[in-house]
Amino acid sequence: MERFYYETPSVSRKADALEYIAEFHRFGSDINGSGGLDRFTDDYEGWLLKLEEDRNLVPDEKKSPAETYFLVRSADKKIVGMVNIRYVLNERLKKYGGNIGYSIRPTERRKGYNKINLYLALKLCRLHGLKKVLLDADTDNPASWRTIEALGGVMLREYFEDEFDHCMVRDYEIDVEKSLERFSHIYEPLLEKT
Ligand SMILES: CC(C)(COP(=O)(O)OP(=O)(O)OC[C@H]1O[C@@H](n2cnc3c(N)ncnc32)[C@H](O)[C@@H]1OP(=O)(O)O)[C@@H](O)C(=O)NCCC(=O)NCCS
């Protein structure tokens, strides 16, 4: 059985991380949950410093502390996905972005990997004391909102978002404890024991 875990980005993953982003460009895919790596492809070390700063940010209306991880498949240590978790929501994130952003590389999609990604993210949210998480997904991105619904997300509203993306967006809430309890039998066996 395949297993997965989160890895903190480090210098040793430079080539793999850049290849991860390059694959999105080759496929013309949106990039989410990368902690801005797509803007730092010529300064990977600078991105690692930025992640350190992101982790320690004091929340305000512009910034919120965030953690970024690689989702890694144990068998071949391949980076198959990324996640960016915001443990504190300011008004901006409440309006757009929510607690969690994620992506799976184009060649590894439709294998259920993002559901594992979100399950792992919820575990970290629980560790940080979060009871509920807010997520949003563009209505025309079923892969994203189906992931959320598969982990028990409840839609709060659907509306035309006219400040950032200018499209129909769905806001969801997940009860962290309930979701982890309900889906542990599916996802726990898929996690690498660390
Ligand atoms: C969204 C994304 C992370 C999904 O990754 P994935 O690993 O393919 O998703 P999964 O295989 O775990 O599937 C999750 C659910 O979406 C469904 N799904 C996946 N791709 C789909 C598609 N192209 N169309 C419709 N449904 C899709 C799956 O069937 C599954 O639903 P189910 O459990 O009801 O069957 C991936 O498409 C991606 O990286 N997109 C670009 C970045 C992005 O849009 N991020 C989200 C915004 S934060």
Image (spheres, rainbow, N blue to C red):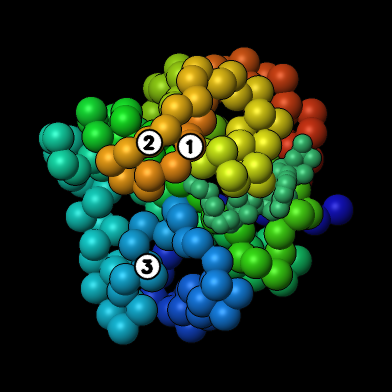
Dot 3 amino acid type: Leu
Residue 32, image x, y percentages: 46, 55
* Gap between marks 2 and 3 measured at Cα: 25 Å
Q: Is residue 119 visible?
A: no
Tags 2 and 1 in contact by the CB under 8 Å rule?
Answer: yes
- SS for callout 3: helix
Residue 165, image x, y percentages: 37, 47
Please state the total of marks drawn on the protein image.
3
The answer to whether residue 185 is left or right of residue 178 is right
Pointer 2 or 1: first along the chain: 2
- The residue that disc 1 covers is 168
Q: Quadrant of residue 178?
A: top right
Which residue is rendered at x = 45% and y = 27% of the image?
A: 159
The answer to whether residue 15 is left or right of residue 49 is right
Dot 1 amino acid type: Met
Pointer 2 or 3: first along the chain: 3
Whether 189 is drawn above or below 15: the answer is above
Residue 176, image x, y percentages: 54, 22
Q: Residues within 10 Å of mark 1 (few under 14, many from 20)?
A: some
Which residue is rendered at x = 50% and y = 25% of the image?
A: 158
* Gap between marks 2 and 1 measured at Cα: 6 Å
Nearer mark to the viewer, of 2 and 3? 2
- The residue that disc 2 covers is 161
- The residue that disc 3 covers is 37
